[in-house]
Image (cartoon, grey):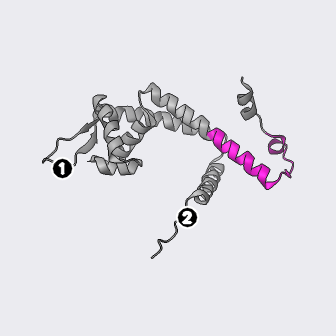
Amino acid sequence: MSSRDAMHDTEPEALTSGKPDHRSEQSLALEIRLRLLDVSHRMRTAIDNQLAALALSRARYQVLAVLEDSGATYIRLLAHRCGVTPSPMLRLLQGMVEAQLVRLAPRARHGQTRVVELCPFGKGLLRHAHDWMESLDRQLLTHLSHAEREELARLLERCSRGLRPVRTPDPE
């Protein structure tokens, strides 16, 4: 076991002893940030490894999941839902078409936007990816009760709200 793994696999005494911890807010914030980064890193690594075993990337998985949710859709709308512009989306889709994960419907007229839809092979691969993601979720949450899971979800949402950019009104 590396020293990094050992560091992450041990709990600070204050977290396990049941005694009140009198650390400063700065120290506590650092502890929380490091734990969130560790969980995030471990999740991304596990997800990337499993998706790679299925010959998928996170980007391809996202496209398949969005198509499953929305059904066949236009490239521009798919790009928007995935947070990219149409040009990189089209490059990603070309590889996915070659891998028979999706298909581009023929254009009805010259200049008309093409529609993207899932192929049967893409649907099957996505089903395997979803099954594995559910297994990862169970593994992540196995030591938490249902009430603790609900509380964790609420706390993470509140943390997330604190990081959302504040929109300022446009000057008139």
For label 2, count other residues whose C-alpha is less than 10 Å away and answer few (under 14), some (14-19) or many (20+). Answer: few
Tag 2 secondary structure: loop
Identity of the residue drawn at 65% across and 44% down: 36
Quadrant housing the N terminus? top right
Work out whether residue 142 can be spotted.
Answer: no
- Tell me the residue that label 2 is attached to: 166
How dense is the environment of label 1, judged by Cα within 10 Å: few (below 14), some, or many (20 and up)?
few
Residue 20, image x and y in percent? 86, 51
Q: Main secondary structure of the magenta part?
A: helix
Residue lying at 87% horizontally and 48% vertically, measured from the top left: 19
Asked where in the image residue 121 lies, by quadrant, the reply is top left
Quarter assignment of residue 60: top left
Q: Which residue occupies the foreground of this view, 132 or 48?
A: 48
Residue linked to disc 1? 112
Q: Is residue 1 magenta?
A: no
Q: Amino acid at mark 1?
A: Gln
Q: Magenta part of the protein: which range? A: 12-39
Do the residues under discs 1 and 2 have CB atoms within 8 angstroms? no
- Residue 149 visible to an observer of this rendering: yes
Q: Is residue 127 left or right of residue 2?
A: left
- The residue at the point 52 percent across, 34 percent down is 47
Q: Earlier in the sequence, mark 1 or mark 2?
A: 1
